[in-house]
Image: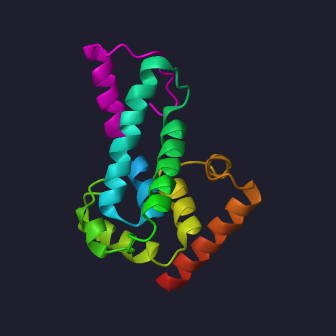
Amino acid sequence: MGQVNIKHYDQSSGDLTEFKQLFNEHKKHVFAVALSILRDFELSEDVLQEVFIKLYQHMKHHEITNVKAWLIRVSRNTALDYYRKKHREITGYDDKYFEQANYFSEDPVDKMVLAKYLKLLNSEERQIVILKEISGLKHKEIAKIMEMPLGTVLWKYGIALKKLRKSLE
């Protein structure tokens, strides 16, 4: 459904079913992007809710050609807005955030591994790795979303992978 073209939305029961499907299919991507920026579980959930409210409102009046790309861009921008507003209040990662999150995986071992290794990366590296590995985006799409040159995204992704490999050894 990521590449689906959504026409104007009229709130019929079929459209609500479609909206629920979109939520279930894309919630982990939106949450992952928000968490990679905010490092705060509760704020990331707030971003998740706000992004899907924006999607619901936007679908009433506009057509969206690539839902996944739209959601990721809006979630990144919304998370950055939250970060700027609440910059002094954000305390950093807490392993409990990943234990509570059902958006990535149901396996507790996966959550522990994810929490441990994402701490090793800086904010941009973390965003790039999450967009690439969890959301499955191409480097070119990540460059567009993050408003960076493709070469920079590739370079930062390579550095992040080296950090992760080194910590695994």
Q: Is residue 158 above or below residue 134?
A: below
Q: Nearer the viewer, residue 37 or 121?
A: 37
Residue 105 in percent (x, y) is at 30, 57
All told, the count of numbered labels is 0
Q: Nearer the viewer, residue 160 or 144?
A: 144
Residue 112 in percent (x, y) is at 31, 73
Which portion, as a residue range, is magenta? 1-26
Where, quadrant-wise, is the N terminus in this rendering? top left
Q: Is residue 29 above or below residue 6?
A: below
* Residue 68 falls inside the magenta stretch: no
Q: Is residue 112 above or below residue 59?
A: below
Instruction: Determine the image quadrant of residue 43.
Output: bottom left
Q: How is the image coloured?
A: rainbow
Q: Is residue 104 visible?
A: no
At horizontal 42% and vertical 32% (from top left) the residue drawn is: 55
Residue 98 in percent (x, y) is at 30, 66
Left or right, 65 with reference to 35: right
Extreme residue toward the bottom, this view: 169
Residue 149 in percent (x, y) is at 75, 55
Q: Nearer the viewer, residue 144 or 92?
A: 92
At horizontal 71% and vertical 67% (from top left) the residue drawn is: 155
Q: Is residue 83 above or below residue 144?
A: below
* Residue 25 falls inside the magenta stretch: yes
Instruction: Determine the image quadrant of residue 18.
Output: top left
At horizontal 30% and vertical 74% (from top left) the residue drawn is: 95
At horizontal 37% and vertical 72% (from top left) the residue drawn is: 115
Left or right, 29 with reference to 125: left
